[in-house]
Amino acid sequence: MQHQKILILDFGSQVTQLIARRVREAQVFCEVHPCDVSEEWIREYAKDGQLKGVILSGSHASVYEDTTDKAPQLIFDLGVPVLGICYGMQTMAYQLGGKVEGGHKREFGFAEVRAHGHTKLLEGIQDFATGDGHGMLNVWMSHGDKVVELPPGFKLMASTPSCPIAGMADEARGFYAVQFHPEVTHTAQGKALLERFVLRICGTRADWIMGDYIEEAVARIREQVGDEEVILGLSGGVDSSVAAALIHRAIGDQLTCVFVDHGLLRLNEGDMVMEMFVGKLHAKVIRADASELFLGKLAGVSDPEAKRKIIGGEFVTVFKEEAAKLKAGTGGHKGATFLAQGTIYPDVIESGGGKSKKAVTIKSHHNVGGLPEQLGLKLLEPLRELFKDEVRELGVALGLPPEMVYRHPFPGPGLGVRILGEVKKEYADLLRRADAIFIEELRNFRDEATGKSWYELTSQAFTVFLPVKSVGVMGDGRTYDYVVALRAVQTSDFMTADWAELPYALLKKVSGRIINEVRGINRVTYDVSSKPPATIEWE
Ligand SMILES: Nc1ncnc2c1ncn2[C@@H]1O[C@H](COP(=O)(O)OP(=O)(O)OP(=O)(O)O)[C@@H](O)[C@H]1O
Ligand SMILES: O=c1[nH]c(=O)c2[nH+]cn([C@@H]3O[C@H](COP(=O)(O)O)[C@@H](O)[C@H]3O)c2[nH]1
Ligand SMILES: NC(=O)CC[C@H](N)C(=O)O
Ligand SMILES: [Mg+2]
């Protein structure tokens, strides 16, 4: 099925992805592309008649400077509605004959916006009304420049005391713009406003529904793969698990999963993954038990980056070996010609478009990128247009258990980056048991106000092994044992994170259980560092 679509042009705002999230929540398909796509590209993109509207994002730049990006002029001639947000509004004004000025006081944070006149966008949407009956919106602003003169054909749609033109519209042409940010949750009516733009003003069909999407994705995978074979690196994490379940639904035994057990998995994780995929889904999974290999290579190495490089390197070696066995045609295999990956949409946006602002390497993230070239395999990435929430919904619709789909992410190098310094099997065994207790209690403890468990209320939680010993007393005897740190964070994007204010009763229970049940650990600490300046993982 062809989905109607909304095009979001990204001028480099920090929150462009949120625009796409909000539009998807309205069950409308949309894509983010860099603002400097060529007119030729746009024509091609709109050719099938499915493009129903365009949204222009914010930016750190100022439109009146010669060097800054402008919207491709063509989008104003496509005959579809356009919504400008912040910089998007400013560039719309500037390009269509209005005036934008800078040098004003920066307006950052909450503002009350007054709606003027009647426009299809704001009519009837309000948080409260003034004494004289005007609709008011509580919004979030982040700008220094402003539109000071409307372009011809536009009327005033919204204002604040410090920003007299905070919204404008030319309804005949379907052009709307707001200086505030409807995509952030601080703008109370923002979701309603974006929903109204895409559904009512653009008239887009609300047909982006994960339950229905399965059928579509399955058909596409079948068409792409034909009768060839596929291999996939299965980690037990969310993305690779959902990708595996989806591809398995499409092509059954033509899929072989390779699950590398590097000896740095969580308690019973390997068995759980096998039980789920082999026991329940009847998928073909090769469990490569490489723990001795990994632990052997890691012996004596304590530098975090060196450890990451070793794990990443050995991972590729093991994966290649297993893939080569399949290629050799053993066990009735014709040999895999596709490598499947659980790449999701944020990965695509962040790495594409030439707009990514890559800075210094803080950590070398492990992944299987680069493998296809070395292996001479074609890529199969069925999740590359989905956000994490959508991947999770899809996983549930595919019948994966919610505990698996709503798991916290787990880094590829696993416990290797949660055992500080040199990795030893003894340490990994202690850490696994302590970590399992922490996670179990996070699932048990519920927050009274929300009814949610603390596992649900945190984005990522785990235990870190510190290879230092401290003195304790147990049963009147002296102990001299290891220390662990508990880490629990709340974050929406993992780029920044706050340490979670876990209830004392929960921390008390966890520390009591770990010290009593895990012989070898006699002290538990709680990590109260936010990111930045700390990172989520300790290495
Ligand atoms: N132990 C493993 N065995 C096989 N493949 C792995 C393993 N660990 C990681 N991978 C591969 O590396 C990819 C990237 O890992 P990453 O942790 O980013 O994603 P994930 O595990 O699928 O999901 P999540 O973000 O929930 O952890 C995985 O999709 C998987 O293909
Ligand atoms: O697949 C992965 N391979 C890695 O090498 C890796 N290192 C960190 N992480 C995860 O990334 C998020 C941010 O972590 P940091 O704040 O520690 O950089 C957190 O969710 C981390 O768990 C990794 N994930
Ligand atoms: N968030 C934005 O899009 C800001 C636009 C522009 N840089 C300003 O300061 O007004
Ligand atoms: Mg993972």
Image (spheres, rainbow, N blue to C red):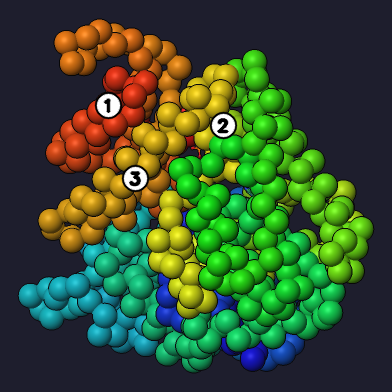
Residue occupying image coordinates x 73% and y 64%:
256
Q: Which amino acid type corresponds to the residue marked 2 in the rendered image?
A: Gly
Decide if residue 203 is on the left or right side of residue 383: left
Mark closer to the chain start, 1 or 2 = 2
Q: Amino acid at mark 3?
A: Ile
Q: Is residue 396 left or right of residue 239?
A: left
Q: Is residue 398 above or below residue 10?
A: below
Q: Amino acid at mark 1?
A: Ile
**Crowding at label 1, few (<14), some or many (≥20) Cα neighbours within 10 Å?**
some
Instruction: Name the residue beneath numbered marker 1.
Output: 515
Closer to the camera in the image, 13 or 304: 304
Q: Secondary structure at mark 3?
A: helix
> Which of the 4 quarters of the picture holds residue 504?
top left
Residue 259 position within the rendered picture, expressed as x and y whole percent measured from the top left: 66, 52
Q: Position of residue 426 (x, y in %)?
A: 50, 24
Residue 439 numbered tag: 3
Residue at the spot 16% in from the left edge and 10% down from the top edge? 476
Discs 1/3, front: 1
With 127 as the anchor, is 12 left or right in this view? right
Asked if labels 3 and 2 touch by Cβ distance under 8 angstroms, the answer is no
Residue at numbered disc 2:
416
